[in-house]
Amino acid sequence: MKTVIVWFRKDLRLHDNEALYKAIQSADQIIPFYCFEESEYGKTHFGFNKTGSFRAQFNIESVSQLRENLLAIGSELCIRNGKTADELLKLVKETNAEKIYSSKDIHSEEIAIQKEVEERLAIPIDYSFGACLYHVNDLPHPYQDTAEVFTSFRKGLEKKARVRELYPSPSKLPKVKIDIDWGSLPSIEDLGLKRIPIDSRAAIKAKGGENEALKRLDHYFFQSLALQEYKNRRNGLLGEDYSSKFSLWLWNGCISPRMIYWKVKEFEKEVKKNQSTYWLIFELIWRDYFKYISLKHGNKIFQLEGIGKSERNWEIDKERFEKWANGETGIPFIDANMRELNSTGFMSNRGRQNVASFLSKEVQLDWRMGAEYFESMLIDYDVASNYGNWMYVSGVGNDPRDRYFNIISQAKRYDANGEFVKHWLPELAEMDASNVHHPWTANQVLFSNDISYPKPMVEPDYWKKYY
Ligand SMILES: Cc1cc2nc3c(=O)[nH]c(=O)nc-3n(C[C@H](O)[C@H](O)[C@H](O)COP(=O)(O)OP(=O)(O)OC[C@H]3O[C@@H](n4cnc5c(N)ncnc54)[C@H](O)[C@@H]3O)c2cc1C
């Protein structure tokens, strides 16, 4: 009897899972395995929790749902909490497994885990690569030649590459006949964290897991039909459907980007094809872009100078950083976004661009402090998307124009009547809309003890023409 292990990593799903599919083709007995890898719960360079409470909770839910789905098709999930290499070594001995099937990761810390597993285990590992919309082998160029400008990359793909078909979800797995300890799901405290409930004002009340992801896909496409308005609404700030929120499930693979793609194609056939349906795929290509940029540049994406060439003066100042991180800068649009992040683990794309630009270009702090803070706080933290976007906005990445966000102009454009800032900053509830984005210009007494909202920590001249 041939026994193999399927080592689940950031592919917590049964659908479109190449590693699982290959294992089913090749073995009589499959042991599904997941380890809450201890190094993912350590500290970042600047001392934040690598995985904050919101993401940890979401991941526990995702693994729990994977186990339920495996049980439903006659199998189980072996769950461990510790060092992956140690746990896999023990499991291989216990089960006499001959091979491991898994998904490849592309970032240094994850590669280090892979390497240790490879070195310590005497059996082969067959890796698949299912994290991207376009498979690395289908790019029209070697990944080392990924263009430094997104548009060239996208056009190349759209002309010359195709998205692969989905691997089918298995309807049955062979029952495991060996008696092993399947292990239990850790609590958030077992991972060294405290549970923080998500604020009831959150844009979306999301739970981890493949079924939840597929439910969200169905809701956004076929129930609410929000997809057909995506391009017009994607810069929104409030509510569940201004954008897809798929990032919440993409980061740990509860949903595959190819599944989203093929559902868009179905929607285009059955409901409507328009600029919005195209634009969702366009955004998924951005996601691929940052993955291939990080594959190309390796650890450069974590360095202060990034992959760009610009020399800048960067500071590390804890006090100013904390004002930003805690949402106490005195600039409502920044504070509202940061408080949303701190209370829910999510922030809109428009918000992320503005708070990142503010930290790196107005306050001029080391952009990596912000990137690491996001790493800790975001549910949807994804190494490539996070560091790629932070570099881009901070002027050390792939933005050929080195854009700059005028916070006041952005706030007035995307939150014209101040609804978003009032949602997160109740202390500004009574402020009239004309001043709410720069309350320091109002005649109202604002900086007294009754209404405690801080004075702005910076006020560049170029904001003033938007007052
Ligand atoms: C400073 C900064 C940090 C970011 N960090 C992350 C991160 O850690 N993880 C993450 O998934 N996204 C990150 N993004 C990208 C983007 O903000 C989120 O993907 C998006 O807000 C998620 O919401 P959504 O799923 O509703 O997006 P939608 O607008 O519905 O987009 C659909 C999907 O397209 C992809 N996408 C959209 N915009 C981008 C983009 N700019 N870059 C890469 N992919 C994109 C995402 O997978 C997203 O789920 C970051 C952006 C900035 C500016």
Image: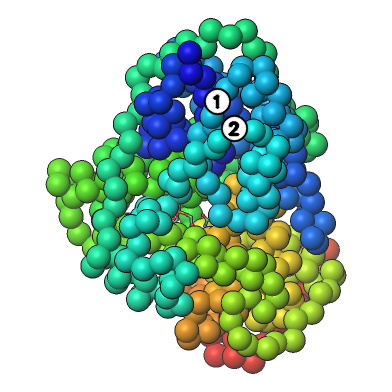
Return the residue found at the far front: 122
For residue 34, what is the image quadrant? top right
Q: Is residue 253 left or right of residue 172?
A: right
Q: Position of residue 151 (x, y in %)?
A: 36, 75
Name the one closer to the observer, 95 or 439: 95
Q: Which residue carries the number 2 mark?
A: 123
Name the one closer to the observer, 214 or 90: 90
Question: Does residue 155 appear anywhere in the picture?
Answer: yes
Label 2 element class: loop
Residue that appears at 67% across and 17% down: 94
Residue type of the residue flagged with mark 2: Ile
Residue that appears at 29% across and 71% down: 155
Q: Tag 1: Cα neighbours inside 10 Å, few (<14), some, or many (≥20)?
A: some
Name the one closer to the observer, 277 or 182: 182
Q: Is residue 261 left or right of residue 353?
A: left
Residue that appears at 54% across and 32% down: 100
Q: CA separation, marks 2 and 1? A: 6 Å
Label 1 element class: loop
Q: Are marks 2 and 1 in contact (CB under 8 Å)?
A: yes
Residue that appears at 35% across and 19% down: 171
Q: Which residue carries the number 1 mark?
A: 98
Q: Position of residue 158 (x, y in %)?
A: 26, 65
Q: Is residue 436 above or below residue 464?
A: above
Q: Is residue 145 above or below residue 265?
A: below
Q: Earlier in the sequence, mark 2 or mark 1?
A: 1
Q: Position of residue 265 (x, y in %)?
A: 22, 48
- In what quadrant of the picture does the C terminus appear? bottom right
Question: Does residue 388 appear anywhere in the picture?
Answer: no
